[in-house]
Structures are given as structure tokens and as C-alpha cells.
Amino acid sequence: MSISLDTEKTGGSAAPGRSRRRSNHKKKARRQWHKNVGIACGILLVVMVTAAGVYGWMGQKYQEVFYPNTMINGLDASGKTVEEVEQYINDGMAGYLLTLELRDGKTEQIDGREIDLHAEYDGTMGNILLTQNPWLWGRHYVTGTGYSIDTMMVYDREKLSRVIHNLACMDPDRSEKPKDAYLSDYKAGTGYQIIPEEQGNRLVEAVVLEGVSEAILNLRTQLSMEELGAYEKPVITAEDETLKARVQAWNKYAQVVVRYQFGDKTETLDGKTIHTWLKDDGQGNPVLDEKGVADFVKALGKEYNTAYTKKSLKTSAGPTVTIIGGNYGWRINQNAETAALAEIIRSGEGQNREPIYSQTAASHTVPDYGDTYVEINLTAQHLYFYKNGSLVVEADFVSGNASKGWSTPAGAYPLTYKQRDATLKGEGYTTPVSYWMPFNGGIGLHDASWRSSFGGTIYKTSGSHGCVNLPPAAAKTIYENISTGIPVLCYHLEGTQKEATAAVPAETTAAAATQPAQTQPAQTQPAQTQPAQTQPTETLPAETSADQTQPAETTPAETTAAPVTEQATEATETATAASQNPADGPGGASTKSSGVVSAPGM
């Protein structure tokens, strides 16, 4: 037991000894650290004091010389004394020449002696030196300082102005003024373009004078007129937004292409023509001259209108005749088409189109009446109706009374319309017919049940007032096969007159023969058939009811309509003609109320 107790006592005394040794070690380390810091601070302080001393020592010279980066009138005065700067200036003015660099590669020179250039020192540079703080030289080393002394460089400004004015580059006869960018004339394939501005080489004298003055004060030996900005500048450049918009507006019109179709023929309207219709509104914007558009449409009509033109017909009798008169054929509505075309051009969108017609025909090729038509031989008093090239019916008829000047006019006419059970009215009579087919104002085809015979020479003394009286069966067949706009071709042909008349047949049937081939007229001049020279003016009496007393077997009194001519002007056409039936002829649809038709040439 005693041994154990001794061991515990020994262990208890050893632990405090180790703690004391560790504590002493830490104290020694702290003392060493403080000692090192003190040494470093001392060294730093010595360095700072030394640097300050060196900085101050270096700054002392700036009591006599200019700071680093000091510019006086553009001359580098850094580290120089006042006397050294003055000498530098004097040396620079001796034999001073200023070279002006021009745009075309040429140069001009100004000699300092021409303007009495010399230096005058008034102490300003010395005063600048006195204001320098030697301790601030470092800051100026970084930022720099510039001074301008107006009284140091002296010259005669009036002489300088005169020298500049007399320079060759200032002579207006030897220089070109700048030219603004502008819109080009129209060129096929490219339209309108912007012609870029031209800079020219005309100098602005006032700008040159100020630039040269500054260069002399800084003793510069070269001066670029380009860098100085001394040249006159164009007002409008190719990048001008207004000019860009303007060229787009002109090209919008000029790029339009309109192709007119006339059967197998095409007429193309494009910028080569349209640009001649564009006028400047005074502000550079395009305005479409509608007179040019109207003239173009008029020219189309002159080329492609066939209404009121001669028609060549290979007759059923054999010879070819030329039919003069009548309004059948193509006719462009000039007012409506001019307005439509102008709108297309303004839209900037071209198209393929047919013009707006006031009336149309069967074909754009010759003959324009096609192969469906009524052929009326006024000399033979015989009629043929062809449909799609085949003969549907032929019959004798009785036309207008020649002895009274009511002859049925020759000519080519479109069927105006057709009507069943019409009542024909004229002065002193009212006559019902079953089939009414007008083609020339009040003149038309109709059945004449009161007649017992047709053809021959009846028309010479007992004819109608202009209408073509037909046997009822023939009128019925024609009525059932004809439609509005079908051409009715009336002509005279010598040598085909028949003296004998034909009784009304029980039934008229289509002939077996087909339409004669539509060949071109022979080389010899074909017979011409013309409308009667005089026709009584059509009168329009008040309508009477359809149930009035009917006339006797003899030919009733009738009113003859005068032949339609191309006296009607385009002023009567309107843009609404495009929505009308294109086959309606002059006069349009006649009155059909109560089945009564006013003033036919019965």
C-alpha cells in the first residue's frame, strides 16, 4: 500500500512543470514577433523618408523648369526653362513654312515671312513657372498641363487673310462645288436610282483662315484640309432617308407591269411607258398624269376596238362583201379602263388583265363575229342563221319600205335582247308579235303573221318601217337558238335580187348545208354594203295598252329607227359598265312592262 501512495504523489508533481515550460515558450515567441515588426516598421519608415527626400529633391528643379507633360501653345515645354522654350520658339519661326495638304493630293504653302511672323514674350511663361509647386510635379507627370499664350506668336492677320485668299486652291474657277445626291432619270431594267453626292474640292475660306491661324500659333508645319473639315459639304447624301423614300416611291410606279390580253395578242405596259406619265409635285414626289393613262387606253381602243369598223363576210350566196356601218364589235370603255389602270399603277401591283369593255364580240380574231350570227341579204330578201358554224334556219323576209325611205340599214349589230309576246307600238298602231328580237334601236327581227308571202320585191313598196318581218316558224326557230349579243349582219349584194315571192311555209326547217368557210376576201375589191343615207328620226309616242285593236292584213304603219353610229361619246360610259351585260348594244334593254315595246321598226 505504501508503494502505491508514493507513485501517485510522484505523478501529481510532474504535470505543473510541463505547463510552465509551454507558457515560457509562448512568451519568447511573442517578444520575437514584436521585435520583427518593429524592425520592419523602422525599415519602412526609413524608405518612406528616403523616398520623400528623393521626391522632394527631384521636385526642386521644377522651380526653374516646367512640369512634365507641359504644353505651351502646342509646343512641348517639359523640363525646359523659360529661356529654352523661347529659344525653341525662335528656332521654329526661323524659315517657318506651313504646308496645306489638299484633297486632290496637291499642296499649298504659307511662308511666315509673308505674314510678318515673329515672337513677343511678355513674361507670361515666367509667371507660369512661378505658380508651379515642386511637390506636385508627380501629379502633372500623369495628367499633364497645357497653356495657350495669345501674345507670344505674333503675325499680321490681315496679311494672312490676303495670302489665304490668293492661294490657288481658293480660286473658284479652279475648284468644283459639291453636288447633292439626287434621283436619276428612269433607266430600263433598273428604274430610278440614287446618284451619289460629289464632294468637290471647294474650300470654305473662313474655316481655312481659323485653322491656319491655330496651326501657326502652334508652329505646326503641316495642316490637312480634309482633317480640318475645310471643304464645302453636300447637303443631301446618298444616305438621306428622304431621298431613299423618294426613290422607292418613284420605283413603285415604274416597276408596275400590266399585260393586256386580246385573244392571242398581248400588249405589255411597263416602266418604259409609265415613267413618261410621272410628274414631280414640286416636292420630289411622283404624281401620275392621268392624261397619259387615258391616251394609252385610247390607243388600245384604236388598235383593238372593232365596233363601227368594216366587216368582211363570205356570204352564203358565194361572193364576199364588206359590211359598212353598225356597232357590233369590241369597244373598250375608256373612262372606266383609264380609272382602273391608274389605280393599278398607284397600287404598285401589276397584273394580267382584259380591259373593261362597254361591249364585246365573239372573237378577237378576224372575223370578230365568230361562227354564230344572223346573215341578212337585203337585196335577196333572204336570211340565214348560223350557230357554231352550222346553218340552223334560212327564210325569206320583208324588210323596210324603200319607196318611203324606210329601208332597213345595212351594218353589223349585236342582238339587244329577245322577248316573247311583245306588243309593238308606233304612231297610230299597236301590234302584238310572238317573237321580238331587236338589234338596231327600234329595228328588229319578229314574226309577221299578217303577211301571206315573203321575199321578192315586196319591201320596195309594201315593206316595213325598218324591221325584218319573218314567217312565224322561222322567227320561232331563230328565237329559240339566238341570245343577246349575237351579231346580225345586214348587207346588199347585187345580182341576188329575186322577183318572185314565197308563200308562208307550214314549217321552216334547218338546211342541211353548213356555214360557208370563213375565208379572207378575194384579191378583187368585195362588194360594199352601206346603210341607207337617210332614215327618219325615231319617235317615242306614249305607250298604249296591249289589248288595243289589231291592224288588218295589210302592213301596219311603223316607225323606223335611225341607224346607230359611233356618235356616242366616251363621256356616257361609266365605271359601272364592267358590271353590265357586256353584250348589251347601244340603247340597252328596251321597256318591257306589260309586254309593250315602244317604237319598233315594225
Image (cartoon, rainbow, N blue to C red):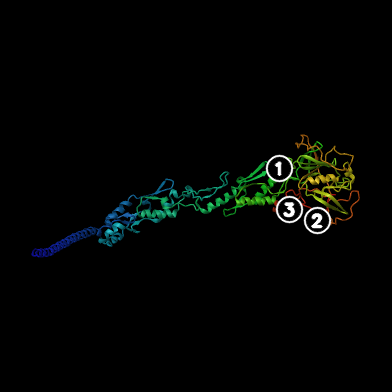
In the picture as drawn, the residue positioned furthest to the left comes out as: 2
Give the Cα distance between marks 1 and 3. Answer: 24 Å
Q: Which residue, given by chain and number where applicable, does mark 2 sit on?
A: 593
Q: In this rendering, would 67 be left or right of 103? A: left
* Element at label 3: helix
Image coords of residue 282 (percent x, y): 58, 54
Q: In this rendering, would 517 be left or right of 197? A: right
Image coords of residue 404 (percent x, y): 88, 47
Q: Which residue, given by chain and number where applicable, does mark 3 sit on?
A: 572
Q: Which of the 4 quarters of the picture holds residue 76?
A: bottom left
* Closer mark to the observer between disc 1 and disc 3: 1
Q: Quadrant of the N terminus?
A: bottom left
Query: Which amino acid type is shown beneath numbered disc 3?
Result: Thr
Within-10-Å neighbours for mark 1: few <14, some 14–19, many 20+: many
Question: In terms of depth relative to the viewer, which is nearer, 268 or 63?
Answer: 268
Q: Which mark is residue 526?
A: none
Query: Which amino acid type is shown beneath numbered disc 1?
Result: His
Q: Which of the 4 quarters of the picture holds residue 130?
A: bottom left
Query: Which amino acid type is shown beneath numbered disc 2?
Result: Ser
Q: In this rendering, would 214 be left or right of 261? A: left
Q: Which of the 4 quarters of the picture holds residue 517?
A: top right
Question: In terms of depth relative to the viewer, which is nearer, 353 or 475?
Answer: 475
Question: In terms of depth relative to the viewer, which is nearer, 338 or 114?
Answer: 338
Image coords of residue 300 (percent x, y): 68, 45
Q: How many numbered callouts?
A: 3
In the picture as drawn, the residue positioned furthest to the top comes out as: 523
Earlier residue among tags 2 and 3: 3
In the picture as drawn, the residue positioned furthest to the front comes out as: 1
Q: Is residue 312 above or below residue 292?
A: above
Give the Cα distance between marks 1 and 2. Answer: 36 Å
Q: Which residue, given by chain and number where applicable, does mark 1 sit on?
A: 364
